[in-house]
Image (cartoon, grey):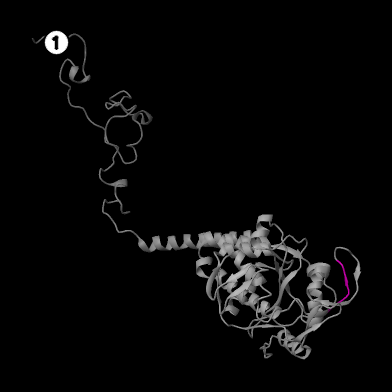
Amino acid sequence: MTDWPEGNRYGQGAGAARPEGPRAMRTVRPGEASVPPQSRGGYDPYGGHAPDGGPGGHGYSQGQVYGGGGGRRGGRGDGVRTAPDWGRRIKVGAITLVLVLLVTTVGTYFWADSKMRREVDLSKVEERPEGGKGTNYLIVGSDSREGLTREDQKRLRTGSTDGKRTDSMMLLHVGSNGNSMISLPRDSWVTIPEFTGSSSGKRIPAQQQKLNAAFSIEGPELLVRTVEFNTGLKIDHYAEIGFGGFANLVDALGGVEMCFDKPVKDKNSGADFAQGCHDLDGAQSLAFVRNRYNAEGGDLGRTKNQQKFLAALANESATPGTVLNPFKLYPTIGAGLDSLIVDEDMSLFNLLSMFWAMKGLSGGDGVQMNMPVTGSFTAPGGQSALKWDMPRVTQLMNELKNDEKVTVKPD
């Protein structure tokens, strides 16, 4: 029973021939625990094989303190939990929000700017008057059917007439003494000055005509030239929108509320509204602003309706429900800019200034009126036209040019 097996089995664990004697363990200095024994030239009692199956290991902790280190939520390294730094978190969150808003704003600006249709060259306008104080916009609603399908033309009751004519014309003055919107009746009898056609190159002789004829003859440039010639007021910017673009813009906004003191009905435009307030969609809005035969005061009453609606449209465009809602804001911007034709020097800032001024007019900030007239008369050719009241017109235009408070009373 006391016979020992042959061979020296010393140092081979429990299977050795005799119990293993004590052995000295090397002291591990800081910084050496993670270095394999082989690389230090030291003795590896396991011959490069860890007892727990790990390659080259020795099965002992490398100096970590369990329960500390990465397991804590604080930042002190002693295992004690610390409170979150809310001040730093709020600061980082605020900076992140500002950066997101900045990137979004800049991106929106360049996107919107790229969609602007700068197609009118005001440098082609001849013999321009001297500029005054403030900014003057000529806003034109045309009967262009551009982009409308036959179904659209039927729904909007626009007909299928080729080309385009002016359906409404307004002067908007933006200044420090209040904003003013002056409608120019399209039946106004004016002098269309001589002009060199930008497309034909032909010299167009001066003639007496209705104001809307200028646009039909040679487009926006001759219309601006005619307005400047008859008013003495320099036009700084031009903006034009057609039937389809107008209707699309209203629909993108989700409609515009209008209130009527009495029923409105016009079989030609399709307007049919009972007394009271209504949310008008694009087709209904177009019918209202085109209503001419049932408008009180005929063409002059029609221009008042157009002013009222444009101010309400601008007001709806600037509400928080539109501006702060990207699902409503971007379609509205897209619908407006896709169909709005402006001059080459019009910037987004100018465009926003124009809409903001119209919004103010809806709240009673400023003056809305028609160009003063003495009444209608039968012009050459048997057509009915409106004659301007030139003493009052001259006074009004001088007040606008000098950016003075308008004292001319509306009709």
Instruction: Please give the name of the residue rendered at 76% of the width and 68% of the height, measured from the top-left corner.
Output: 165
Instruction: Please give the name of the residue rendered at 70% of the width and 76% of the height, measured from the top-left corner.
Output: 170
Residue 227: image location, x then y, percent: 78, 77
Q: Secondary structure at mark 1?
A: loop
Residue 376: image location, x then y, percent: 77, 84
Q: Is residue 178 left or right of residue 59?
A: right
Report the quarter where the C terminus lies: bottom right
Residue 377: image location, x then y, percent: 80, 84
Nearest to the observer: residue 118 or residue 79:
118
Nearest to the observer: residue 311 or residue 380:
380
Image quarter of residue 269 = bottom right
Residue 285: image location, x then y, percent: 61, 68
Q: How many marks?
A: 1
Nearest to the observer: residue 299 or residue 307:
299
Residue 65 visible to the viewer: yes
Please give the residue where the numbered disc 1 appears in the rendered image: 4
Identify residue type, mark 1.
Answer: Trp
Magenta-colored span: 191-197
Magenta-colored stretch includes residue 56? no
Report the quarter where the N terminus lies: top left
Q: How would you rate the neighbour count of disc 1 (Cα within 10 Å): few for under 14, some for 14-19, many for 20 or more?
A: few
- Extreme-left residue of the structure: 1
